[in-house]
Image (tube, rainbow, N blue to C red):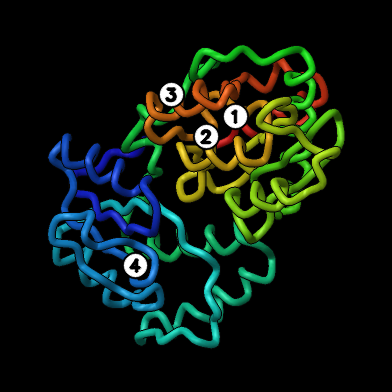
Amino acid sequence: MAEFERLGLIAGGGDLPVYVAEAAQGGDRLACVIALKGFADPTRYESPIIRGIAQLGQVVKDLRLADCDAVCFAGIVTRPDFSALKPDLKGMTFLPQALAAATRGDDALLRAIVGFFEKEGFTVIGANDIADELLVEPGLIGAVEPSPGVRADAAKALHIAGVTGAEDIGQGAVVCDGLVLAVEAQEGTDQMLARVAGLPPELRGSAMTRKGVLAKRPKPDQERRIDLPVIGVSTVEGAARAGLAGIVIPAGGAMVLGREAVARAADAAGLAVWAVTLDELPGVADDRNSDRKH
């Protein structure tokens, strides 16, 4: 991780930016929180600054006034309707670059955003570097052990997520009995799991007979400082409603929000949740090197 002294947190929705804020405060390095209007809940932070996502000039000014030398992006921000944005002057200058990058996919857009802040003189720090306890080692998260069939579905789901991720589509996939039930796209993981829950019962598992696996992993070669995969209790609950038997993530390649709570929820539902080293999985070895970059 790059060295820095004062961090500005640009917060979107969800719990991840709250974890990052608490971790940075613990190290006495959090200088300011910029809560993105329409995404972040400002009541979850102490004295946040509220800005629109296109107010780049104001955001840069806020960071400089707080003497920040680094910035961290964390939380859910959905792709905006660019025609409805109300940018300030600096945002308007950046907008053509953002539009061009967006046509190439989400990762290209995120790289453009990272590049913008680096050109403004800020070091961009990953959420996982601030709250490194959210990364997990290989092994179970909870007490439920995946069966050989569940492990086979996990290997295929990780491979499919890698293939679709290479096309900058999404970071997740669901496989049941070797059949691909869903891949994540713009809707996100929760909505993907809701789609699986709506499939005919004969295609998926149930609360009585769980089967199938959700895999989440980084896109090969993605910009990891701004969009590392995350799972939490809501992920477990969505997988349980979909009748799945497990959730698998790559060790060191995804963050777990509230590990103990995730373990309790998984055990209560009878789901296996575990982290793997991609090298160990047949069918996933071809793209393992991409996930080691950065």
Do callouts 3 and 2 mark residues in contact (Cβ within 8 Å)?
no
Badge 2 local density, few (<14 within 10 Å), some, or many (20+)? many
How would you rate the neighbour count of disc 4 (Cα within 10 Å): few for under 14, some for 14-19, many for 20 or more?
many
Q: Residue furthest front?
A: 208
Q: Residue at x 62, y 19 (%)?
A: 277
Mark-to-mark CA distance, 3 and 4? 32 Å
* Residue linked to disc 3: 264
- State the separation of the CA atoms marked 3 and 1: 17 Å
- At 58% from the left edge and 22% from the top edge, which residue is drawn? 270
Q: Is residue 176 above or below residue 152?
A: below
Query: Are discs 1 and 2 less than 8 Å apart at CB?
Result: yes
Circle 3 sits in a helix, a strand or a loop, which is it? helix
Question: Mark 3 Cα within 10 Å, few/some/many (few <14, many 20+)?
Answer: some
Residue at numbered disc 4:
36
Tell which of 228 and 266 is nearer to you.
266
Quarter occupied by residue 176: top right
Residue drawn at the location 37% of the way across and 32% of the way down: 258
Q: Which residue is mark 1?
A: 249
Residue 290 versus residue 108 in the image, above or below? above
Q: Position of residue 119 (x, y in %)?
A: 39, 63
Q: Secondary structure at mark 1?
A: strand
Q: Residues within 10 Å of mark 1 (few under 14, many from 20)?
A: many
Q: Quadrant of residue 246?
A: top right
CA distance separating discs 2 and 4: 23 Å
Mark 1: amino acid? Ile
Q: Position of residue 201 (x, y in %)?
A: 80, 41
- Please report whichever mark, 1 or 2, sits nearer to the chain's N-terminal start: 1
**For the residues carrying marks 3 and 2, which lies nearer the camera in this image?**
3
Q: Kindly tell me whether residue 170 is visible in this rendering.
A: no
Residue labelled with disc 2? 254
